[in-house]
Image (spheres, helix red, strand yellow):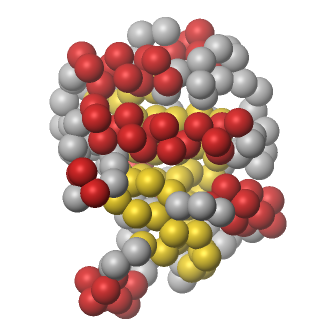
Amino acid sequence: MRTKSRGADEYLAGEGLFGGAIDKDMITVLVRVTHGPEALAATLSALVPAVAAGLVGDAVILAREQDEVLAKVADAAGASLVVAENVSWRDGVEVARREWLLCLDDGDIPQEGWIRVLDRFVGLAQPEQGLARFRRHGAGMSGLMRRVFLRSRIHAGDLVHRRVLLNEVKARTPVRLSARIERDPVFG
């Protein structure tokens, strides 16, 4: 089952946090919900400066089941809500309005300087590059193993071109961005 949050069409027309004209250097943020509305709210609030800076143009919330509180949070932010049993990043690309997509899990908080780094990457990168990856604080050995064995798999903290998610272009080895992302400690 796929749904849009109530009032999403109004927000897409220019109202709400994630409304406005389409700009080729703007990105869509896909937020996968696993910890609930509080973690989602923490991530969305961290995106507000990027909306104000003109980097983030819209957001898509990805959830496994319908939840009235999640729908209200999405509606208040002007984000689209996609509900699917086996929700994936690809479900989000169908609703996304931009070419570059930032994949986040609820509770992810981009750290200082991320807006400048992504703005520069999106402005200069070609779609064929397809994939860039935030650095994660404390990723340690698991982060090393993930980088070695799961290079082309898309996961939270990746900036990916829509053509990669649609399997139109094969992603190259991810560009390691200097920007960092951390988990809100409340949500692990």
Residue at 52% in and 21% down: 78
- Is residue 48 among what the camera can see? yes
Q: Is residue 11 above or below residue 157?
A: above
* Point 69% across, 65% down: residue: 117
Depth order, front residue of 16/22 = 16
- Residue 118 in sight here: no
Left or right side of 102 for 24: right
How many labels sit on residues?
A: 0
Q: Where in the figure is residue 115, as x and y percent of width and height?
A: 67, 56
In this view, 8 is above or below 87: above
User: Could you say which is closer to the camera, residue 99 or residue 35?
Assistant: 35
Percent across and percent down for residue 43 are 42, 44
Q: Quadrant of the N terminus?
A: top left
Instruction: Give the image location of residue 120, x and y in percent.
Output: 77, 63
Which quadrant, please, contains the C terminus? bottom left
In the figure, is residue 122 to the left or right of 61? right
Say whether residue 187 is left or right of residue 124.
Answer: left
- Quadrant of the rendered structure where residue 64 is? top left
Residue 59 x, y percent position in the rendering? 52, 35
Q: Residue at x 28, y 32 (%)?
A: 37
Rendered image quadrant of residue 39: top left
Residue 53: name its quadrant. top right
Residue pictured at 30% horizontal, 25% vertical: 70
Side of 30 relative to 28 (left or right): left
